[in-house]
Image (cartoon, grey):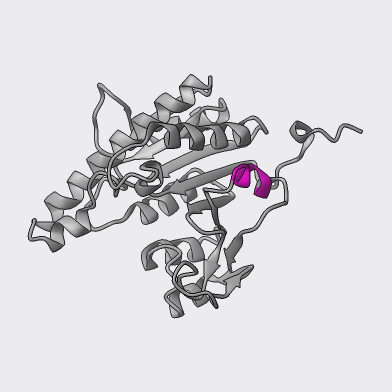
Amino acid sequence: MDNTPDSLQPKFKRVLLKISGEALMGDQGFGLHPPTVQRIAREVKSVHDLGVEICMVIGGGNIFRGLSGSAQGMERTTADYMGMLATIMNALAMQSALEELDVFTRVISAIRMDEVCEPYIRRRAVRHLEKKRVCIFAAGTGNPYFTTDTAATLRANEMACEAIFKGTKVDGVYDKDPKKHADAKRYDEVTYDEVLAQHLGVMDASAIALARDNNLPIIVFSLDEPGGFRGILAGQGTYTSVHG
C-alpha cells in the first residue's frame, strides 16, 4: 500500500481558507512582505496537490482597515470601500505567488474591476473550482458594514464548501490571549454558541451565526506552523474545531 504523503485521503474535498491581511505583512508593520506571501502560497499549493478544491478570502488590514478609518473620523461607508479595495491588492499578490508555483488562480471581486479580476458570478466560480483553480474572493461582500469574516462565511456557503479554515497566529481558540496569559486554555472543540456567549473572538458574531445556521464547521489553526494546513486535512496537527 502506498503511504506517501500524496496518497493521503484528505478529510474535505472543498474548503475555504480565510486569512487576515496582517498575515501577509510578516514582521513588517504595514503592507506586503513577498517572502511571507510566497510561504503561504506554498502552503496552499501543498493542499491543492492533494486534490482539494480551495477558495480563499484575504482581509485588507495590512493596507487599510475600514473600521479603524471610521474611528479616526472618516465616514464609515467610504472607509469600508477603501478596505475592500485593499483586499483586492492582497488577492492579486496571492494570485501572482500561486501562479509562480503553477497553480491556476482566479481573483473574483464583489466590486466590478474587469481589467484586473473577474466579477463574482456564483456558477462561474463553482466551475473554476471544479476545474481545480484556486478562487480568491476579494472586496468582501461588496457592501459596507460587513467584515471579511462574514464574506468568507457567505462565500463558503455559496460554494458548498465543507469547512472554513481560519489561519491565525495561534494554534486554535483560547479562552484568553495566550501571548499575554501563560494560563490560557486551548479548546480542541467549541460550539458556535459558546464562541458567541464567551466572546472568544474566532470571527465576528455575524459570521459565526451564519456558519451556525448552515452547520458549516470552522477550523482554527496556526498559519505560522509549516505544513499545518495540509496536516489538518490529513487528520494531524493542532487546531480547534468550531461546530454545532
Q: Which stretch did the figure color magenta? A: 226-232
Tell me which residue sits at (49%, 38%) in the image.
Answer: 40
Relative to 113, is 182 above or below? below
Look at the image and tell me in which quarter the C terminus lies.
bottom right
x, y percentage for residue 139?
29, 42
Q: Can residue 21 be seen?
A: yes
Tell me which residue sits at (51%, 77%) in the image.
Answer: 194
Near-viewer residue (60 or 25): 25
x, y percentage for residue 25?
36, 42
Task: Say left or right for 211 vs 186.
Answer: left
Q: Is residue 230 found inside the magenta-colored segment of the image? A: yes
Task: Say left or right for 25 vs 170.
Answer: left
Near-viewer residue (25 or 213): 25
Q: Exactly how many numbered labels are in the figure?
A: 0
Identify the residue at the far right of this view: 1
Relative to 131, is 71 above or below? below
x, y percentage for residue 7?
79, 33
Name the dominant secondary structure of the magenta segment.
helix
Task: Say left or right for 54 vs 206.
Answer: right
Q: Can residue 120 be seen?
A: no
Q: Is residue 125 found inside the magenta-colored segment of the image? A: no
Task: Say left or right for 29 vs 36.
Answer: left
Tell me which residue sits at (72%, 45%) in the image.
Answer: 234
Relative to 52, is 216 above or below? below
Tell me which residue sits at (37%, 64%) in the image.
Answer: 206
Relative to 40, is 212 above or below? below
x, y percentage for residue 63?
25, 44
Q: Quadrant of residue 208?
A: bottom left
Look at the image and tell me in which quarter the N terminus lies.
top right
Q: Quadrant of residue 9?
A: top right
